[in-house]
Image (tube, grey):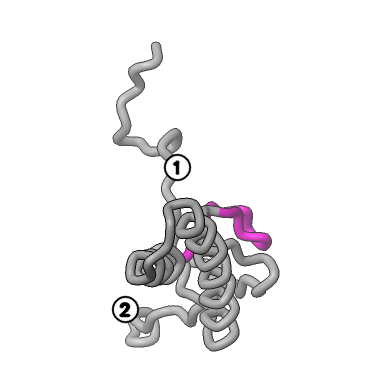
């Protein structure tokens, strides 16, 4: 095994076909098929966790720290959650594409139990 085989892949590269996935073809929060090889991939757990913290955590702290009524707090939270999600995705993908993970389908897993028969 050569030392080159152990180097991690660059961000935005499909782990199945080793081809880059373009920014416009990237789905940041859910699984999607690689446009090159049709393998099921998703962004890394760290990228998705940071997205959820940015999208839900920061707006929650802002709304809870402001003294607002329930209805205005919910409306503010919805607007902030959307704005922070768009901001995080724009900044994070402009700086560097996220690392990708292969997704194992439950149907094709050889160790899964076939209890539907």
The N terminus appears in which quarter of the rendering?
bottom left
Secondary structure at numbered mark 2: loop
Position of residue 107 relative to residue 57, above or below, is above
Give x and y (percent) for residue 49: 37, 66
Question: Based on the displayed image, in which of its 4 quarters is residue 51 positioned?
Answer: bottom left
Q: Is residue 35 covered in magenta?
A: yes
The C terminus appears in which quarter of the rendering?
top left
In the rendered image, which residue does mark 1 sit on?
Answer: 105
**Residue in view at x 35 percent, y 36 percent:** 110
Of tags 2 and 1, which is closer to the observer?
1
Magenta region: 32-44
Cα distance, mark 2 to mark 1? 29 Å
Q: Residues within 10 Å of mark 1 (few under 14, many from 20)?
A: few
- Residue 75 in the figure: left or right of residue 66: right
Does residue 50 appear in the picture of this structure? no
Secondary structure at numbered mark 1: loop
Give x and y (percent) for residue 63: 40, 66
- Residue 66 in the figure: left or right of residue 29: left
In this rendered view, identify the residue nearer to me: 60 or 20: 60
In this rendered view, identify the residue nearer to me: 67 or 28: 67
Q: Are marks 2 and 1 in contact (CB under 8 Å)?
A: no
- Residue 74 in the figure: left or right of residue 1: right
**Residue in view at x 41 percent, y 37 percent:** 106
Position of residue 29 relative to residue 54, above or below, is above
Give x and y (percent) for residue 32: 58, 54
Question: Based on the displayed image, in which of its 4 quarters is residue 114 positioned?
Answer: top left
Q: Residues within 10 Å of mark 2 (few under 14, many from 20)?
A: few
In the rendered image, which residue does mark 2 sit on?
Answer: 1
């Amino acid at each position: 095994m050569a030392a080159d085989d152990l180097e991690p892949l660059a961000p935005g590269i499909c782990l199945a076909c080793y081809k880059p996935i373009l920014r416009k073809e990237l789905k940041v929060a859910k699984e999607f098929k690689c446009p090159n090889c049709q393998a099921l991939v998703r962004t890394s757990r760290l990228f998705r966790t940071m997205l959820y913290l940015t999208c839900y955590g920061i707006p929650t702290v802002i709304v809870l720290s402001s003294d607002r009524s329930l209805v205005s707090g919910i409306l503010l939270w919805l607007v902030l959650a959307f704005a922070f999600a768009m901001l995080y995705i724009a900044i994070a993908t402009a700086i560097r594409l996220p690392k990708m993970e292969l997704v194992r389908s439950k149907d094709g897993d050889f160790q899964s139990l076939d209890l539907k028969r």
